[in-house]
Image: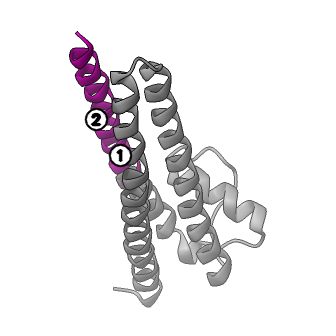
Amino acid sequence: MEPVWAASWIAGLSLITLTTAFHAFGVVMIYLAVMRRARSAEIRARHGRHPIVHAVSLVAVVGLLLTVLHGIEAAIWMLAYLALGAIGSEQDAMLYSLDSFTTRGASEVLLTRHWGLMGALEAADGMLLFGISTAFVFAVFQRVIQGIDLAATARR
């Protein structure tokens, strides 16, 4: 394997490991905060206080927090691109990173040829992390809906 190719692999896989660990930590912290709120929603629902509004709010807050988490992860890749000299400016590095992370790939910004593989690895990382986020939103939504159902049953 060429040294250039190996450096791109090592940097990309290291960033995937870092952002996956960061994402897992963030999701666990969001889960702990949301599940406390979900339990309080169940208690409120049993007493007739707007359980649907609370449920929608919880899911929306989870969506917002996950978006911030993904933004931070894209910024980690951006910082790596700048540190490696793969892109010249912060603005171009962030645009490229977000394009790759979301697999949109529509910007005209490109990495230097030496680091080109990292864009593909960032896209793989983004797909993995968005998949984790999707599963997490589904789990939260299930939990929140279950709480509303339990509360509705308790009131009958």
Percent x, y for residue 75? 62, 65
Quick one: 52 or 136, which is closer to the camera?
A: 52
Which disc, if any, is residue 143? 2
Instruction: Please identify the quadrant where the C terminus is shown.
Output: top left
Q: Main secondary structure of the magenta part?
A: helix
The residue type indicated by label 1 comes to Met
How packed mark 1 is, by other alpha carbons closer than 10 Å (few <14, some 14-19, many 20 or more), is some
Left or right: where 109 falls relative to 27: right
Q: Could you tell me which residue is drawn at 62 percent across and 74 percent down? A: 81
Q: Secondary structure at mark 2?
A: helix
Query: CA separation, marks 1 and 2?
Result: 8 Å
How packed mark 2 is, by other alpha carbons closer than 10 Å (few <14, some 14-19, many 20 or more), is some
Which disc, if any, is residue 5? none
The residue type indicated by label 2 comes to Arg
Q: Tag count in the figure?
A: 2
Mark toward the start of the polypeptide (1 vs 2): 1
Which disc, if any, is residue 35? 1
Residue 95 position by quadrant: bottom right
Instruction: Please identify the quadrant where the N terminus is shown.
Output: bottom left
Left or right: where 35 falls relative to 73: left
Q: Is residue 141 magenta?
A: yes
Q: Which portion, as a residue range, is magenta? A: 129-156
Q: Is residue 1 magenta?
A: no
52 is higher (above) or lower (below) than 156: below
Percent x, y for residue 6? 40, 84
Percent x, y for residue 73? 53, 63
Q: Could you tell me which residue is drawn at 27 percent across and 31 percent down? A: 142
